[in-house]
Amino acid sequence: MNIHKYLKSQKINISVPGIINYLYALTNAYIVHKVPRSEIGGLKISEVREKYYYEDLGLQNAIRSFNPARDLHKLLENLVYLHLKRKGYSVFVGKLGDKEVDFVAEKEGVKMYFQVTLSMVEECTKQRELGNLVLIEDNYPKYVVTWNDPFGTGDWEGIRHLNALEFLTNFE
């Protein structure tokens, strides 16, 4: 459990069951959202290794003391998650073999896939973010949301690029 490893590295001794109890309480208080992992293709929901996203980004920053170098990409991912939920989507973390797709969003029987990254200026980042989406064999829409850098004409092998502002203002 990553939370347990992090707390241990900070010399905070708490058991895994204790962490699970705290996460359960935070979820029930609507401070965080628990997002399950889902197998892409079969939509098998996994009860382990779920991810958590804050309901209030300001609260997250107050708790963690905001550090742009460390936290901006996490905030962007959290923001995309919240926007999808507020638009009425069911949201999962996608699992494709040993790879992860940031979000699988479903509404009214239609799926969409999302990768979220600050920038795709570096070729290795572009290959990582786009590569996970290219591996998905169905024809549902695929998107990469970045802080604001475009690539090419906005599409790459059918994957649409949206900068964060465009995503937040125009994406339904």
Image (tube, rainbow, N blue to C red):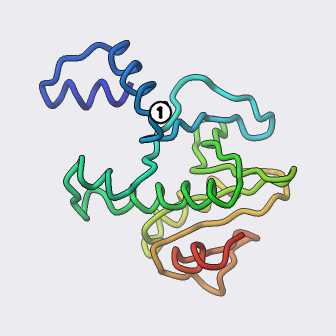
Measured along the vertical axis of the image, is residue 148 above or below residue 109?
below
Relative to 81, 23 lies left or right: left
Residue at image point 33% right, 30% down: 3
For the residue labelled by badge 1, is the local secondary structure a helix, a strand or a loop? helix
**Relative horizontal placement of residue 95, taking residue 28 as reference (left or right):** right
Apparent side of residue 121 relative to residue 116 in the rendered image (left or right): left
Q: Where does the C terminus fall, quadrant-wise?
A: bottom right
Percent position (x, y) of residue 19? 34, 21
Q: Residue at x 44, y 71 (%)?
A: 119
- Could you classify mark 1 by the number of other residues whose Cα lies within 10 Å: few (under 14), some (14-19), or many (20 or more)? some
Viewer-nearest residue: 93 or 135: 93
For the residue pair 56 and 121, the one nearer the viewer reads as 56
Question: Foreground: 144 or 34?
Answer: 34
Which residue is labeled 1 in the image?
A: 27
Closer to the camera, 102 or 130? 102
The amino acid beneath tag 1 is Thr
Q: Quadrant of residue 84?
A: bottom right
In percent of width and height, residue 165 lies at 52, 79
Which residue of the protein is positioned furthest toward the bottom in this rendering? 153
Count of marks overlaid on the render: 1
Q: Left or right of 56: which side holds 90?
A: right
Q: In which quarter of the image is the N terminus?
A: top left
**Picture residue at 74% right of the left edge, 71% below the top:** 157
Query: What residue is at 80 percent from the left and 34 percent from the top?
Result: 42
Q: Could you say where residue 48 lies in the image, as x and y percent from the top left?
A: 55, 23
Residue 21 point in image, percent of width and height: 39, 18
- Which residue appears farthest toward the left when viewing the image? 11
Vertical position of residue 43 compared to residue 170: above or below? above
